[in-house]
Amino acid sequence: MTAIARALALVTLLAGEVSAQSKLKMIVDQDARGPCTTDIQSILMFVQSPRAEVLGVTIVSGDLWMEQELRHTLRALEIAGRTDIPVYRGAVHPLVHTQDEAKRWETLYGKQPYQGAWDGEAGPYETLPLREGEPTIGPAEGHAANFIVDVVNRFPGEVTIWGGGPLTNIALAIALDPELPRKAKELVVMGGGIAARYRREFNWWFDPEAARIVLRAPWKRISVTPADVSTKTRHSDEIVARIARAGTPLARYIEEFHAVPRDPSNADWVPEIFMWDELSAASVLDPSLITETREMYIDVDIDRGIQYGYTLAWEPDQHEPPGVAKVNVHVDVDLARFYDLYVELMTRVALRHDADDLDESHLGQRGPQLSPMGVEVETPQLDLDPEGFSTLLLQEELDCVARFVPRHGVGGTRRRAVGVRELRSRFLLPDGSARWAKLSSMRE
């Protein structure tokens, strides 16, 4: 080998090492409605990016129930050729907020137009067939909150936690390790709203107590992509056409299943095509896309009145509320560069070769020809019988809840909502009595 060749090899090796070292270590926490929604597409942006090292994806109920979202995520990662990334089951229910309480709120104050999983036909432990085909892989063992704690402690000061859904998993992780926010590199979330029309944004409304706990925790840095800036974006047919030209399995998936507006005449409010979470993901992968930010104090109203779940925001020179963190709020974006980044990521060839054996029979088929059930395979890890997976799903979650209640129990009239009996009725499945004994002994 000549001296020049040796030098070039050394430069290449060093460049590879620097590239690996400079990658962003990420935990992606998401309520992954699918197929091809803002939730799934934001996950795909991270896993497709050469800048990000996704250490794991954690799933939380929100737009759908957690178990249904889990399967959408596993299937999307299969299509993207990234089955190397572990996916973890997370919280099934909000910490305190319940569907019955939401209905009671509506009788007093009016209709809440979108309620995510609570609007669905299936229950929390039921699932529906996936239009994009069933996943052939299962989730990783363990609970999302434990995974978050383990990874942040393994890489102190290096891990960025990104949240695109309700913040329940992250709140439970803080309950397990109150020092976790100080050990993480940064928290970035999509949620909340500054203008009056956006203040009851879904993610924080679905679990207001979790949002308050997370936002008030001592993070080194918090960045928030609120609904205000997200609604400047559109997942247009033009963007889909640009992606479709790549012809990859992922491009075909997006072409086939991308969400379209239900009412094209309503230009002001078509949430099916707003790129809520993709924009927040892009702010992590290329912060320069955000052209304007503002420091504000941000909190969530958890009083059980008309503003329950509302975002509370103050300018620094207006008021300094005690205990409330100062947050970096995204205000404006370079749309052209954002769309270019999104298209670039969605058209990249898979970094692994998992897609070589991918069954694509569900991609490119139209109308009634699309089989909803996918390839029939053995998937023991996806056993949906409640008595079969309740221990796997709830064992660590009950541990998290048991620690959450004594430390973060809400006082006054809200103590009832986190009482032992309600937690038991909401979190316990038929074969969970042994685990319940531990929780019961801590509170009674």
Image (tube, grey):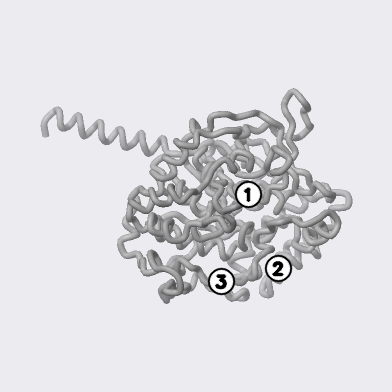
Q: Nearer the viewer, residue 394 or 68?
A: 68
Q: Nearer the viewer, residue 213 or 80?
A: 80
The residue tagged 3 is: 128
Crowding at dot 1, Cα within 10 Å, few <14 / some 14-19 / many 20+, comes out as few
Residue 133 drawn at (x, y percent): 45, 68
Tell me the amino acid under the disc marked 2: Leu
Q: CA distance from mark 2 to mark 3?
A: 22 Å
Q: Is residue 433 above or below residue 257?
A: below
Quadrant in which the C terminus is drawn: bottom right
* Secondary structure state at the residue bearing disc 3: loop
Q: Is residue 377 left or right of residue 65?
A: left
Taking the spot 38% from the left edge, 64% from the top edge, the residue there is: 364
The residue tagged 1 is: 269
Taking the spot 72% from the left edge, 28% from the top edge, the residue there is: 315
Tell me the amino acid under the disc marked 3: Leu
Q: Nearer the viewer, mark 2 or mark 3?
A: 3
Crowding at dot 2, Cα within 10 Å, few <14 / some 14-19 / many 20+, comes out as some
The residue tagged 2 is: 428
Q: Is residue 265 above or below residue 315?
A: below
Residue farthest along the left direction in this orientation: 2
Q: Is residue 364 above or below residue 30?
A: below
Q: Is residue 191 left or right of residue 47?
A: right
